[in-house]
Amino acid sequence: MMRQRTKELLTAAAGAFAETRSPFENAWLVEHEVTLDECVNLSDEIARAIRIYVNAPDDVRLRNSFRDTMVESGVHAEVVEHAMDGLRMKQIVSKLKRDGAKGGG
């Protein structure tokens, strides 16, 4: 389980990146009272998140990008998740019908 402080720093770092700032510049580190150990841990956690994102299947990255965009535009996260689940179910049913039509002939 991730520590609360780590979550706070990662959230703040994401905000810094969104503002085209580096969470590793001295001013940001001082502003957030980041210790040397926390800085190293923050770097490791950001690297891990990037590796997970890069290695994720395309549909997972697309789904996450879509969800984030919708939530940022003000749509409640739960509504977006339910809508995406419904779309995914339609996609699965369409694939099953298509595959069944190919094998049923």
Image (cartoon, rainbow, N blue to C red):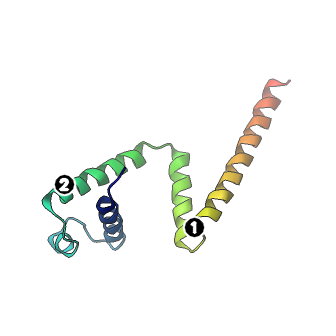
The residue under label 1 is 70
Image point (29%, 62%), residue name: 5
Work out whether residue 68 or residue 34 is closer to the camera in this orientation and state it: 34
Q: Which amino acid does label 2 sit on?
A: Val
- Crowd around label 1: few <14 · some 14–19 · many ≥20 (10 Å): some
The residue under label 2 is 40
Residue 85: x, y in percent? 66, 52
**In the picture, residue 71 is in which quadrant?**
bottom right
Relative to 53, 12 lies left or right? left
Image point (57%, 67%), residue name: 70
SS category of the residue bearing label 2: helix
SS category of the residue bearing label 1: helix
**In the picture, residue 81 is in which quadrant?**
bottom right
Residue 43: x, y in percent? 24, 55
- Crowd around label 2: few <14 · some 14–19 · many ≥20 (10 Å): few
Residue 10 vertical position relative to residue 59 in the rendered view, above or below: below
Image point (71%, 41%), residue name: 92
Work out whether residue 16 or residue 34 is closer to the camera in this orientation and state it: 34
Residue 29 vertical position relative to residue 93 in the rendered view, above or below: below
